[in-house]
Image (cartoon, rainbow, N blue to C red):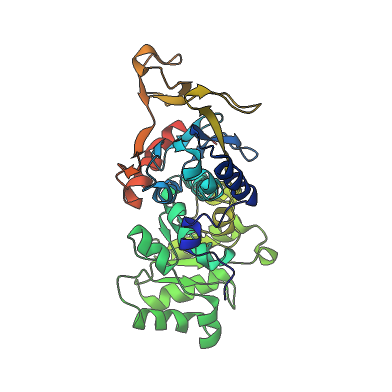
Amino acid sequence: MFHIAGEEDIRRGKLTDIYFKRTEEILRFKKINPFVKTEVMLKSFPPDYSWGILAGVEEALKLLSGLDSISVKCMPEGSYFREFEPVMTIEGKYLDFGVYETAILGFLCQASGIATSAARCKICAGQKQIFSFGARRVHPSIAPMVDRNAFIGGADGVSTIPGAELIGEEPVGTIPHALILIIGDTVEATRAFHEIIKPEVARISLIDTFNDEKFEAINVSRAMGGKLFGVRLDTPSSRRGDFKKILEEIRWELDIRGFKDVKLMVSGGISEKDIVQLRDIVDAFGIGTSISAAPIIDFALDIVEIEGKPIAKRGKRSGGKKVFRCCECGKDIVVPDTEKKGDYSCASCGSSYDEVFIDAIRSGKSVYDYPEAGVIRDRVIKSFRFLDL
């Protein structure tokens, strides 16, 4: 038996911190069940972060929909957010949803961390492609979630079959070292791939298994006779030396032999810093741990009103809130939820504000139009003009 929770366990509130169960027991015994308003807000960003990409919304809403007293407003999935901005408000009878706090935060914190890291990598890459290759660095039960949120954040493709099915795309992959080791030769393994795998799959050869990458690149390019799409270097760090110089040498040698169309792809421990350093010579990046093991976004879920009266614990601002966003420069303000956007104009550029939150659940009924992953990704890509690293 694998050490994972089933969907039914989550829906039954079994996946919760025990003190929520004890709170539920006490309140039911005392017959106390107030109508509360709660908000999900960032506690703190990881070091060097100044914004995040919201993800995990679909799963959180599907958990909460159908609960009669519950209404939810939130930023649309794929929205960017900054410090001290609520991203979701949940209101209803406390005992109807309090036990789900652990699961809601789990959905949002990890998914947003992955989407944010993918977005940062995509911004670093500019016009070059990035692919999510991190499934082997996480528990297999959550690999599809990792792939979906990496794609939402900006990845151009994902490697696992269920992850690709979830986003409505074809999975992306090249050749593993195992195939080359078993066949015994890089050129012959590449030929076998070309012979057997369907033609719409790009022919990309892995060139660091046995010999010098430059000569393997030349050999497979010659052998494939113009049918090679690209070469991938997964060279271990212990063998890389000056990795950029190696890549520049390969590019030179391929170009002078007429293989200018052969793309260069790198993988293996690629970080944001590596992407920036290599993006002028590399055409695509396979990114694993930097995305799949991304720092979580440390949201908290707190009560801000009870029976319509503002109240919050120390360190939190009581009362419901809205986020208004300038439609021109992307700057945000947070105001009491009684305010109207027409009462404000942007202090930076003078333009009007849009309200960021949308209705997602009204009295237990879902009114959220769950967009396709590609639509969410487009939203993220368009927001890059407002985001700096």
Q: Is residue 123 visible?
A: no
Q: Is residue 46 left or right of residue 226?
A: right
| Residue found at x 32% / y 60% | 168
Residue 26 lies, in percent from the top left, at: 61, 44
Which quadrant of the figure has residue 328? top left
> Horizontal and vertical percent for residue 273?
60, 47
Q: Position of residue 71 (x, y in %)?
A: 39, 37
Looking at the picture, how far across and down is residue 103, in whole percent?
53, 51
Q: Is residue 147 above or below residue 221?
A: above
Question: Image point 56% across, 83% down: which residue?
Answer: 181
Quarter holding residue 91: top left
Q: Residue at x 37, y 43 (%)?
A: 68
The residue sitting at the bottom extreme is: 183
Which quadrant of the figure has residue 353? top left
Closer-to-camera residue (48/210) = 48
Q: Looking at this view, is 86 or 129 the one in front? A: 86
User: Taking 296 as reference, is 146 above or below it?
Assistant: below
Nearest the eye: 10 or 236: 10
